[in-house]
Image: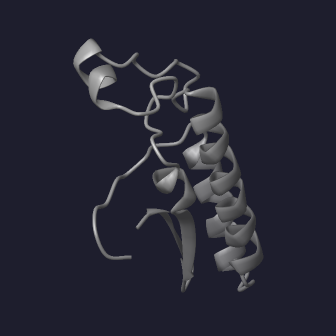
Amino acid sequence: MAGSFIQIDITGQAKVAQALNKLLRQGQDVSPALIDIGEYLEETHKQRFVDQQAPNGEPWEPLSPKTLKKKKRQDRVLTETGTLVDTLNYQLGVNQLQFGSN
């Protein structure tokens, strides 16, 4: 993907990596697992926009009064038109998954 890159550390990452490495050692195609992970990431991140929550469950910081004055939609953090959440997607490569936004 072109553009920005953000790395996210996931709780339980070691177990996920261990399971994927085991599949790789066994010579199995990990694409189905990566697709499931990509779908899960899309679903959970879109829900975070609805809940306005960070991955750890903490609520997003409220908007400052200065920002509220500029926004058309003042009831939602990180949402004005919905473009950001609508561009969340994943791409599969050879034994890899990339997740992010355009």
Q: Which quarter of the rendering shows the C terminus?
A: bottom left
Q: In this view, does 49 lie to the left or right of 74?
A: right
Q: In which quarter of the image is residue 12?
A: top right
Q: Residue 88: image x %, image y %?
A: 53, 60
Image quarter in which the N terminus is found: bottom left
Furthest toward the left, the residue is: 66
Whether 32 is drawn above or below 6: the answer is: below
| Residue in front for this viewpoint, 80 or 48 | 80
Q: Quadrant of residue 57?
A: top right
Q: In this view, does 75 lie above or below 44?
A: above
Which percent across, then down, holds residue 84?
Answer: 46, 53
| Residue 55 shown left or right of residue 61 in the figure | right
Q: In this view, does 27 lie to the left or right of 57?
A: right
Please report the residue visible at 67 percent of the width from the left and 39 percent of the height from the top: 47
**Up-down relation of residue 94 to residue 83 (above or below):** below
- Is 47 placed left or right of 99 in the picture? right
Q: Residue at x 71, y 86 (%)?
A: 27
State the residue in front, 64 or 36.
Answer: 64
Can you give x and y, in whole percent of width and height, for residue 22 in the image?
A: 69, 68
Give me the residue at 40% from left, 16% from top.
62
